[in-house]
Image (tube, rainbow, N blue to C red):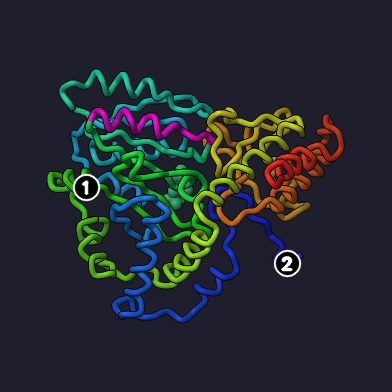
Amino acid sequence: MEDKHMLMIPGPTPVPEQVLLEMAKHPIGHRSAAFSKIMAEVTENLQWLFQTKNDVFCLAASGTGAMEAGLINFINAGDKVLVGENGKFGERWAIICDTYGMDVERVKAPWGEALDPAIFKAKLEADTAKEIKAVVITHSETSTGVLNDLETISGYVKAHGALMIVDAVTSLGSCNVPTDAWGLDVVASGSQKGFMLPPGLGFVSVSDKAWAAYEHAKIPRFYLDLKSAQKNLAKNTTPFTPPVNLIFGLKASLAMMKREGLENIFARHKRLTEATRAAVKALGLKTFAPDGNASTAVTAVDPAPLGAEDVRKAIAQQFDISLAGGQDDYKGKIFRIGHLGFVHDRDILTAIAALEATLHGLGHTDFESGAGVKAAATVFQKSAS
Ligand SMILES: *Cc1c(COP(=O)(O)O)cnc(C)c1O
């Protein structure tokens, strides 16, 4: 059936109708007073979402563009950086650092496990010469569904004095990311995840401490130079033509988020995560990330002995539901259920019911009929009472 596609991947995520309609409007001039008024509003609301008084910039870039901007404006070639690597996006951070000739030390954990904060603590405490200029990690590792302990790691970084640079692409808008309270110097995100928007915007926040590092940062940059973004934002404008219609959409999505409230947004994502994980387990499948470090954006599932790609193909064919596959070594081994942004309890019930029927169709019948939906519904009932 047409127009019944259900997007359950960790980005791009579904977009609410009121946001789509806002973006369908005719563009306006980006140097107009009307547009500056919108920029002022979205900037204030981004600061609310990031829980910060720092500058927050919108870039016409995907999340990776925001990550790159968040590094090259503050770190020099040859600078020592500790990069947490326990999945595809941690790896991406390390590759960007390598690309610019930074002195990268990878702090690894296996895919599916969280980074160990104690390793960061030990390395930072041993660095009495203060050679480490930044610690760079991914908060919610989308490739595995693992949530890293950003609060603890950033505490160690603060005590040391290095910059804390964070990929919060799938954590912002799905769980608590209190930029100022946790002392996060640079926080990067992207529009197609928790923001309930199509792809195309990157976001990056910058602390005073990071701005001090900017004064000594020599990597050549033009389009991604954040000082020019700062100068322009002081006048509620941007250095280059922004995707005006995406900013219209951002205005609408941030207004929706404000009406829901941060606490409710976090509680909703926690509930969706718990329901999904309970359902997956009730269906006799394994969750890939441990319970204590589960991302609230995405649940990765190991369906062995079934093939993950067979499950994805079958659920797409019969139910028109898109689930994400595994990446790199985990391609074919895991599938991922996205539940961030414009997702509600009903969507999980639907996806789980469809997953159950799909598993049945593939010959996996090792569960009581309705077990998945029952487990998810129980979580929803508990949180409603
Ligand atoms: C989606 C995502 C990104 C950004 O990817 P783009 O394709 O550049 O938008 C970065 N980090 C994480 C954790 C992500 O989930």
Q: Which image quarter: residue 6?
A: bottom right
Please identify the quadrant where the C terminus is shown: top right
Query: Which residue carries the number 1 mark?
Result: 208
Q: Residues within 10 Å of mark 2 (few under 14, many from 20)?
A: few
Residue range highlighted in magenta: 144-160
Instruction: Report the predominant secondary structure element of the magenta stretch.
Output: helix
In this rendering, the count of numbered labels is 2
Residue 132 visible in the shown view:
yes
Is 44 or 122 nearer to us in this picture? 44
Sequence-wise, the earlier of marks 1 and 2 is: 2
Query: Which residue is located at x 53 percent, y 63 percent?
Result: 256
- Above or below 220: residue 371: above
Q: Are marks 1 and 2 in contact (CB under 8 Å)?
A: no
Q: Nearer the viewer, mark 1 or mark 2?
A: 1
Query: Which residue carries the number 2 mark?
Result: 2
Residue pushed farthest right? Answer: 369
Please name the amino acid that badge 1 sits on. Asp
Q: Could you say whether the residue bearing mark 1 is in a helix, strand or loop?
A: helix
Query: Which residue is located at x 35 percent, y 39 percent?
Result: 182
Query: Which residue is located at x 49 percent, y 60 percent?
Result: 258
